[in-house]
Amino acid sequence: MSSSYKVTLIPGDGIGPEVVNAAVRILEATGVKFEWESYAAGAEAFEKYHEYIPKELTESIERTHVGLKGPVTTPIGGGFSSINVALRKQFELFANFRPIRNLPAVPTRYPGVDLVIVRENTEGLYSGIEHEVVPGVVESLKIITEKASTRISRFAFEYARRMHRKKIHAIHKANIMKLSDGLFIRCSRNISKEYPEITYGEHIVDNTCMQLVMNPYQYDMLLLENLYGDIISDLCAAFVGGLGLVPGANFGHECAIFEAVHGSAPDIAGKDIANPTAVLRSGILMLRHLGEENAANHIRLALEKVYTERTHVTRDVGGTAGTSEFADAMVEALHTIPPPQPELHEVEL
Ligand code: ATP
């Protein structure tokens, strides 16, 4: 615990500034003190600094070791490379962690989902190594290394052991990509032997999509390389009410950056209708990372209250409230619910 936490804030663009500002208000309402160091990234930063990731932003993360980030738009089919991916590579944030849990009274097809997705964050098809071989033919390289595959497997199994999770499935397409995905599952299989209390399985990614939709409860934790992790995360977000609700964290050995699973959602940007819950729940993960368990649990209780009452929830989950009305209700709830005592059995969300 500290009297004040320095945190690098990247509001991002599209719905980013709206949802991040709402989350910041709610985080501050817990009484935890933050010193936010706020920086633009992406197209907005380029206009100002002629850099997509300004030096000042990099230096801030090196100083604070913790970031809370909104989505930054990645141009499709051309333009600059993803800032999200670049930050993960620059700070070696090798583990992308995405817990999927229902909130009360959000209409979904599947109640009581409790899944954890662990995604390798630094390589695979996200290596961004693409070139045109001859006009009309391009090549994109999928890089899988023993080092990164072992490191992410170790992260997943350590988390499972610490949080008493029961099962990990490594997800792959090693029947087709025999070398690359073959290496990935060989590494996870090797690591799994050191954790006999955790059941280990392997499923092919296309079958996993079907299995998830048929019965998501058969899985406990999913361990995936980069691209499969991206796709399966959005699929799993739908189990609990959509992208507006699902948080994420990127962990490295030195730094951690907390961000929602969703993108900049330009279709709803600037209208005060986006749901800030995904960024806020990323803030819950950040509070736990900082050791502020009570504040994290306090927000969790306030979320349960606001969602159970349903009068101030946003449209994506069937309500009518705007982003700021939801934030007001959360601040009010934090002021009326007493802060909880530390819980014996910690849950993330
Ligand atoms: P990216 O490829 O940049 O990760 P994405 O494919 O995940 O982006 P989003 O920009 O997140 O796509 O948006 C997908 C859909 O989900 C859009 O229709 C958007 O309106 C909706 N959506 C995303 N985030 C939110 C949110 N916070 N609140 C409400 N709706 C959202």
Image: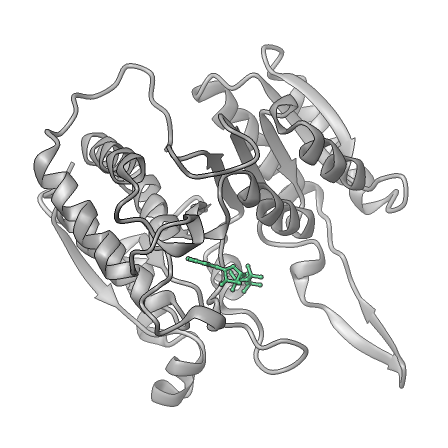
Work out whether residue 47 can be spotted.
yes
Q: Is residue 5 above or below residue 57?
A: above
Residue under the point 66% across and 60% down: 126
Q: Is residue 299 above or below residue 13?
A: above
Residue under the point 68% across and 78% down: 77
Q: Is residue 206 above or below residue 168?
A: below
Query: Quarter of the image containing the N terminus?
Result: top left
How does the figure colour the protein chain or chains? Answer: one colour
Q: Percent position (x, y) of residue 311?
A: 26, 45
Q: Percent position (x, y) of residue 142?
A: 76, 57
Residue under the point 79% across and 76% down: 131
Q: In the picture provided, is 229 more to the left or to the right than 137?
A: left
Snapshot quadrant of residue 120: top right
Q: Percent position (x, y) of residue 217?
A: 61, 24
Work out whether residue 5 can be spotted.
no
Q: In the picture provided, is 317 more to the left or to the right than 134?
A: left
Q: Nearer the viewer, residue 71 or 190?
A: 71
Snapshot quadrant of residue 201: top right
Q: Residue furthest top?
A: 197
Query: Quarter of the image containing the C terminus?
Result: top left
